[in-house]
């Protein structure tokens, strides 16, 4: 491992690469959210102003989700989620209070398990988060990871704080 970026003495809490362009990397630490377009050789601060105090506290990990179809579309947040469609130059606040887990399919549709204004459930967006469709009530337990795949690529799996994955595909 080689240290890269502005993270000396600051733990990186999340890293996400762009499946469509592996040279594009996003990283979050207490210093902010940073973007590299050259596989980590250089970094640009792209922190949404509203998330700066949350990141600076160093007490939460900000999850980062990069669209598999477009390396400039990124979702980030903790109790309030934000989206950029221009690689971090600008950010838009989304309706979600919290997202426990998300997963993209190969077409760029984002599936989320979370809470929209207190209503827990499964959600889907086909327009980079501009609108969301509730698909079902979702699991009762805290979900920390979601994954589309397996033998049937349309099957949604979720895992919480336990050691197993469960098929939670909405009806």
Image (cartoon, rainbow, N blue to C red):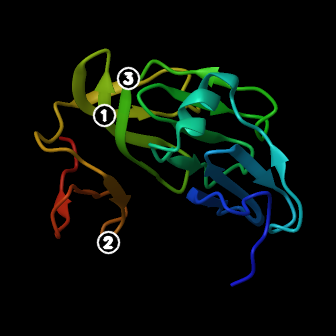
Does the CB distance between marks 2 and 1 fall below 8 Å?
Answer: no
Provide residue 33's location: percent of width, then percent of height. Answer: 68, 44
In three-dimensional space, the C-alpha distance between marks 2 and 1, rounded to whole angstroms, equals: 22 Å
As helix, strand or loop, the secondary structure at mark 1 comes to: strand
Q: Which residue is mark 3?
A: 97
How many marks are shown on the rendered structure?
A: 3
- Give the side of residue 59 with respect to residue 26, left or right: left
- Disc 2 crowd rating (10 Å Cα; few below 14, some 14-19, many 20+) is few
Residue 100 position by quadrant: top left
Which of label 2 and label 1 is nearer to you?
1
In three-dimensional space, the C-alpha distance between marks 3 and 1, rounded to whole angstroms, equals: 8 Å
Provide residue 73's location: percent of width, then percent of height. Answer: 68, 41
Does the CB distance between marks 3 and 1 fall below 8 Å?
Answer: yes
- Give the side of residue 126 with respect to residue 36, left or right: left
Name the one closer to the observer, 141 or 125.
Answer: 141
In the image, residue 100 above or below residue 12: above
Q: Residue furthest left?
A: 140
Q: Quadrant of the N terminus?
A: bottom right
Q: Which residue is mark 1?
A: 114
Which of label 3 and label 1 is nearer to you?
3
As helix, strand or loop, the secondary structure at mark 2 comes to: loop
């Amino acid at each position: 491992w080689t240290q890269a970026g502005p993270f000396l003495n600051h733990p990186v809490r999340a890293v996400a690469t762009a499946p469509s362009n592996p040279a594009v990397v996003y990283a979050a630490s207490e210093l902010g959210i940073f973007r590299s377009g050259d596989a980590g050789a250089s970094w640009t601060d792209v922190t949404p102003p509203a998330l700066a105090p949350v990141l600076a506290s160093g007490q939460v990990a900000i999850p980062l989700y990069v669209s598999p179809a477009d390396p400039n579309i990124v979702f980030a947040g903790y109790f309030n989620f934000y989206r950029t469609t221009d690689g971090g130059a600008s950010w838009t606040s989304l309706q979600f209070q919290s997202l426990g887990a998300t997963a993209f399919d190969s077409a760029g549709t984002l599936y989320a398990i979370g809470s929209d204004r207190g209503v827990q459930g499964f959600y889907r967006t086909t327009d980079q988060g501009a609108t969301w469709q509730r698909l079902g009530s979702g699991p009762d337990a805290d979900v920390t990871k979601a994954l589309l795949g397996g033998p049937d690529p349309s099957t949604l799996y979720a895992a919480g704080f336990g050691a197993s994955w469960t098929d939670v595909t909405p009806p």
